[in-house]
Every structure is written in C-alpha cells, then in structure tokens.
Image (spheres, helix red, strand yellow):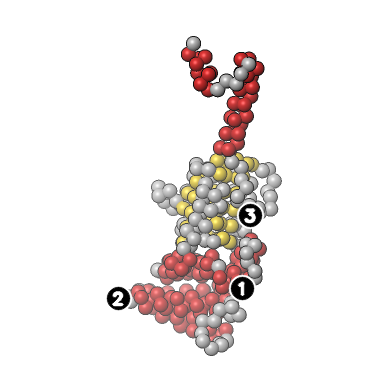
Amino acid sequence: MINYAHLKSQMIQLLDLLRSILYPNVFDAMEEAHSKEELEAAARRQLREILERIYREPPQYDDVIDTLFSKLPAIRDTLDTDVQAAYEGDPAATCQEEVMLAYPAFEAISIFRIAHELYLMKAPMLPRMMTEYAHSLTGIDIHPGATVGPYFFIDHGTGVVIGETCVIGDNVKLYQGVTLGGTGKDVGKRHPTIGDNVVIGAGAKVLGPFTVGSGSKIGALAVVLKAVPPNCTVVGNPGRIVRREGVAPQIDLDHVHLPDPIREHIVALERRVSELEEQMHNHYGTTVFKEDIQDDADL
C-alpha cells in the first residue's frame, strides 16, 4: 500500500532539487552548497524512490529518469522566456529574480513544465500530483497534459484553469480567473487552442475545442464559445467580435480599453431621441416627451 503523505513529501523534495538544478544561483534545496552533479544525483535518487512506489512494473522507470534529466536544459531555456515575459509584461516587476522568487505564476509554470515532460512519458500519477501541488500553492490549475509555448505569462494568477487538451501558442498572456476549459460534452480534444500573441482578460472563459486566432484579445469576463479569427477583439457574454484587423499587430497588453458595443448603442439611441425631440419641438413648439407622444398615438 502506498503511503501518500510520504509520497507527497518526497515529491516536494524532488521539485526543490530540480529547481536548484535549473536555477542554482536562485534556489538552494540543501542547507550547504553542493555541486550540480551532487544535486542531480540526489534528485535522481529521489525520483527513483518515488517511481518505485508508483510503478507496478519496475523496469519502466529507468528510461523515465534518464529522459527527464536530458530534458532539463530545454526546460530551463523555456522557463527563461517565461521569466522574461513576466518581467517585460508587468511594470511592477523590478528584476527577473523577483519574478522567480515572488510570482506565484512562475512557481505554477515551472512545476507544470517539469510535470508535462513526465506526462509525455506516461509516468503514472506523479505529473498530476505535481500540478495539483502547484494548484494548492498558487491557485493556478494547469493540467500536465496541456501544451504551452514559450514566453507564457499569467498575471496575478488566482483562479486560472487550463485543461488537459488545451494548446497555447507563443507569447500568450492570461489574467486572473481565466478558464481555458471544455463544455463537458466533448471527448478527445476538449479544450481550446490559443494562437500566438493572444491576451485574455481577467475572468474570461474560453470553452470548447476551437481556435482563438493569433493576435486576438479577449476582454475581461467574456464568455467565448466559438472560434475567433486572428487579430480580433472579443467582448461580452456571449462573446462578440467587435474589432477585426487585417494586419497582425504587436502584442498589446491593454485589455481594459476595449470597445463597448452596448454603450455605443445606448449613446446612439440617446442621440436619436434628442434629434426626434428637436423635430417635435419644431413641430409643436414645445418639447414633447414619451407621455405626450403616447397621448397623441391614442387619439
């Protein structure tokens, strides 16, 4: 029988060791300084012990260990782009080390990128345990099966949900409360594909196995249930395309100053009412209100 509390403790120690290998100048999983080789040896032992507890057929875990450690340089390269995206995309960030040490999104993304590699190797249980641990720490829920490109930034992060079959392109920014989810009716590919250079505002929901085209912006609290062409702006519930652009813009992080079609309609109606009142005034010699018009209609 697996002691899950002990297994979770080992997993946390493993993640600490892996982060120390990835960023030795920022994280230190051991009280005393150790070489990269010593850290890797300790992490390999920890991972082996975890996999021995989980695997029912032991011969498989040697390949998993070797493959994961061969992937660490590529994971580091991608995480560097995530740090850069956060530093450049958040005016409150004072340095890249602050992003790594203080931003919950970096913690969630770094754990996800490790778990994703284990997921691709079909390692049982451990990838999901890792991302659920990150979820408990940060409030950011990224399924290890999701595919996420470089330069990924989640601002604030609380309440973000990214489903198993979601595909996210390069240079994408999400704000707090975003859901990239399914509708509960689909099987197989159930979650959206997000193109490059997309910004999705706070609280927006993108639900279903369709594509949000590159260069598009999804406004705060929008609910998107169908495909969005490239370089469009979507607002409202249900989501409506309120702007189309023929040329792909550079990524624009402004998700506040978006078109408001409801307000535009109200302004147009008010303008038309004013025009009609002026016409009625010219005709009757006095301002006519709705009640007067209704009285005339009853005659």
**Given contact means CB atoms under 8 Å apart, are the residues at marks 1 and 2 in contact?**
no
Determine the residue positioned at 56% across, 60% down.
155
Label 2 element class? loop
Can residue 131 be seen here? no
Mark-to-mark CA distance, 1 and 3: 22 Å
- The amino acid on which the numbered mark 3 sits, given as a three-letter code, is Leu
User: Residue 42: horizontal and vertical position, in percent?
Assistant: 49, 84
Point out residue 84 in the picture as x, y percentages from the top left corner: 64, 66
Q: CA distance from mark 2 to mark 3?
A: 50 Å
Compare residues 255 and 65 and report the one nearer the observer: 255
109 relative to 31, above or below? above
Toward the viewer: 223 or 245?
223
Q: Earlier in the sequence, mark 2 or mark 3?
A: 2
Few, some or many residues within 10 Å of mark 2 (<14, 14–19, 20+):
few
Q: Which residue is mark 3?
A: 253
198 and 284: which one is in front? 284
- Which class describes the residues within 10 Å of circle 3: few (<14), some (14-19), or many (20+)? some
Mark pair 1, 2: CA separation: 41 Å
Residue 266 is drawn in which quadrant? top right
* Residue 160 image position (x, y, % from top left): 49, 58
Tag shown at residue 97: 1
Q: Quarter of the image holding residue 89?
A: bottom right
Say which residue label 2 marks: 1
